[in-house]
Image (cartoon, grey):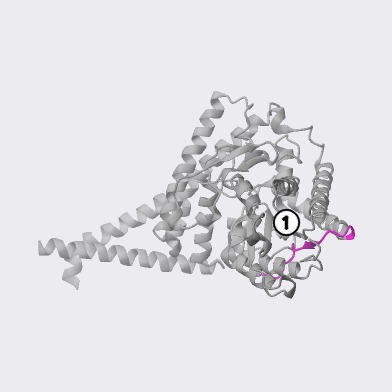
Amino acid sequence: MKRLLSRALVVVGVLAVTFALLEVGYRIVLSAKGESHSATARRAGYIGQLDWIVRPHGPIAMGSFEFEEASEEDLGRPIEGAVLSPYLGVERVALMETYVPGARYFETPEADSTFDVVIVGGSVAAILAADEPARAEIESVLSEDPRLAGRPIRIHGQARPGFKAPQTSILCDLLFQLGWRPDLIVLLDGFNEVALANENRRMGGHPLYPPIPTWAHLAPDIDTTSTDIDRLVEMELAQREARRLLERTVRWGLYRSAIASRLMDALISRPTARHSRALRDLELRRNDGSMPLALRGPAAPDGLDEALAGMIDTWRESSISLDAACDARGIPFLHVLQPTLYDPGAKPISKNEKRRCLISDEWREGVVGGYPLLREAGAELVARDVDFRDASRIFADWEGDLYYDSCHVAPAGSLEIAKFIAREARALPHLAPADR
Amino acid sequence: MKSFLARNWPFIVIPIVIVLIFVAVILFMEDGDPEAGFSYPL
């Protein structure tokens, strides 16, 4: 018995030493390659992937929409989905359920004595609006403004992943017509308007239409074939397997170890690649001249240049419409162009970002061709008295890791964008109009 | 020490070999599709 115990101890000790040596060895290899292991960055990366899986993107709706859920405690909780919307293309159930309570709130004396900020845009805006330090920054800077006379600040996150112009201006119009009367609208956008719009084009749809992958799965007239169903099942199973692995990586704290992260990356790569291959096949089939008209919209423009020009026009006109709708109700409007990693000059891309933040050809093409045009159109907005601000260069001197995928930043980045928004909002000459 | 090693070498070498095989198999099975990845299409 004693001998058995001592041998078991030897085995346990050997295993511990082996893993410790592997960990040290791998960190040395990483450092020789000029890379480093950051548990915080790795965790953010895993949470980011998990976040994607549990949300309604791509041809399979699995998702919920509470960004606060990105914590260990909330992983694996019941999920809710997205629905078709007659006005927005696609809508998240959780946010649809804020329409009426929100409108009722704006009838109350509490709303009169509160400075209500509504943040709209895509996922970068949604993540920022749910990030506690970023919200606190905006609240703190605005609360110091004497024009607000000590009114408490309340931030309403109304951004939706995958949203782009004109969905954002249509959404605000919808909220206004329901009775929402915020004191400030902040629109943070840019990436989806060029990257996702270009993806629509490459998929055979119109760039103006809602991003096809965010609602194709909900559209009723898709002529799904049995092979499509096989692919959808394959994607569903691959997502489940990846989700299981990612949840374990986060729950067990494996992201703290460089070698364990590396091994989990290798394990996760298999379902990820299976998912990608099935999705690619599905997209190819749907692009094969058979995309339903409801999804495709009007005929897509020929060529990238013409398409980009249309995308930028829509973005600018959507901003002008939103500005006018706000102006008609005496609501200040701040439009901010978000930074993005693959916009040349936006940020020195770190080695980790280069490896982890992959971008598809259609998004890169949209970003590289579209961002300079967005900046030019932004200047036109300013000339038309729209309070447009360009934040696309705020990370131009930021060395090191910041992005965890091709467009989303870690919390430090959200905080930096929030600082920019807070500063620019406070500088608005009509932040608290007296004649409202 | 020598007699300890002589007595216990299988309990030292075998776990090391198993761990190394385990690591090698996982890395060998990695699927490096450059377009794969669960990230926001946003």
Question: Can the viewer see residue A407 in this picture?
Answer: no
Q: Which of A317 and A18 is in front in this view?
A: A317
Q: In this view, does A75 lie to the left or right of A18?
A: right
**Residue at x-position 14% and y-position 61%:** A4
**Residue at x-position 53% and y-position 33%:** A232
* Label 1 sits on residue: A187
Q: Quadrant of the C terminus of chain A?
A: bottom right
Reply yes or no: does residue A386 show up in magenta.
yes
How packed mark 1 is, by other alpha carbons closer than 10 Å (few <14, some 14-19, many 20 or more), is many
Q: In which quarter of the image is the N terminus of chain A?
A: bottom left
Number of callouts in the render? 1
**Residue at x-position 43% and y-position 57%:** A73
**Residue at the right extreme, as displayed:** A383
Where residue A184 appears, x then y in whole percent?
73, 60
Region rendered in magenta: A383-398
Q: Nearer the viewer, residue B2 or A262?
A: A262
Q: Is residue A297 left or right of residue A238?
A: right
**Residue at x-position 51% and y-position 61%:** A42
Question: Can the viewer see residue A358 in this picture?
Answer: yes
Where residue A234 appears, x then y in whole percent?
49, 35
Q: Nearer the viewer, residue A154 or A260?
A: A154
**Residue at the front extreme, as displayed:** A109
Reply yes or no: does residue A117 show up in magenta.
no
Q: In this view, does B25 lie to the left or right of A366?
A: left
Tag 1 subunit: A
Q: In this view, does A398 lie above or below A96?
A: below
For mark 1, give the secondary structure.
strand
Where residue A180 appears, x then y in whole percent?
69, 52
